[in-house]
Amino acid sequence: LLLLVVVGVLAAGAVWVFVKGQQAADALTTARAGVAEVRESLGAGDPAGASQQLDIVQQDTARAVQATSGPVFAIASAIPVVGATPAAVRDVAEAADDLAQQALPDLLEAGVALNPDTLRAGGDRLNLNAFESAAPALESAAASLTAITADVAGIETAATPARVQDAVAVAARRRIVH
């Protein structure tokens, strides 16, 4: 009877981790699409729309982190070999959230400052003050991206399924997003 209870608890834990991992994957997929919308809004000269979409992206990545947090996910991540997959999913979710909370707001700020309408000072002249005002945000974004890239590079995927390995590889290549 005790064995049956232990097996039942382990099975329930495995299902819980799978469901939460899928919730995180879904949230990250939505966030990636949202980043494309941020870029499109900014390119269309709609900084307010880009900012609103960034808020949604940040909510999506926070949902991914929330889905991979908690004691069941932490215990599953700590199990040798088997825990590599939930640990990698958690680490990707955290990296995506860092990107959304730290780097993307700075990049949005720089994008607004470097709007083509702002850059033109008349005729063929450029407003160099726009570059100066964008520089701190770009420096901050670069520092965040460097840290996030290092975090993603440190994610161990050797004992994970191909789907997880591919997701981490894409995150490393694209720095989470294109």
Image (cartoon, rainbow, N blue to C red):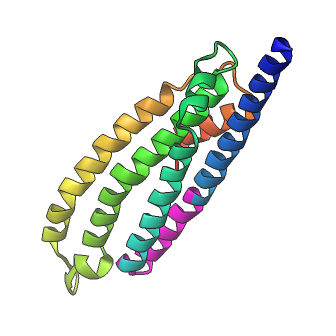
The dominant secondary structure in magenta is helix
Q: Nearer the viewer, residue 149 or 23?
A: 23
Q: Is residue 7 magenta?
A: no
As drawn, the residue found furthest toward the bottom would be 123
Drawn side of residue 31 relative to residue 130, left or right: right
Decide if residue 120 is on the left or right side of residue 161.
left
Residue 113 image offset from top left, x and y in percent: 25, 70
Residue 98, position in %: x, y? 40, 45
Whether residue 178 appears in this view of the structure is no
Residue drawn at x 48%, y 65% as measured from the top left = 56
- Residue 162, image quadrant: top right
Residue 147 location, quadrant = top left
Quadrant where the image shows the N terminus: top right
Residue 58 pos. (x, y %): 45, 58
The number of callouts visible is 0
Residue 54, how many percent across, how many down? 43, 65
Out of 7 and 43, give the one closest to the viewer: 7
- Span highlighted in magenta in the image: 31-47
Q: Is residue 137 above or below residue 115?
A: above
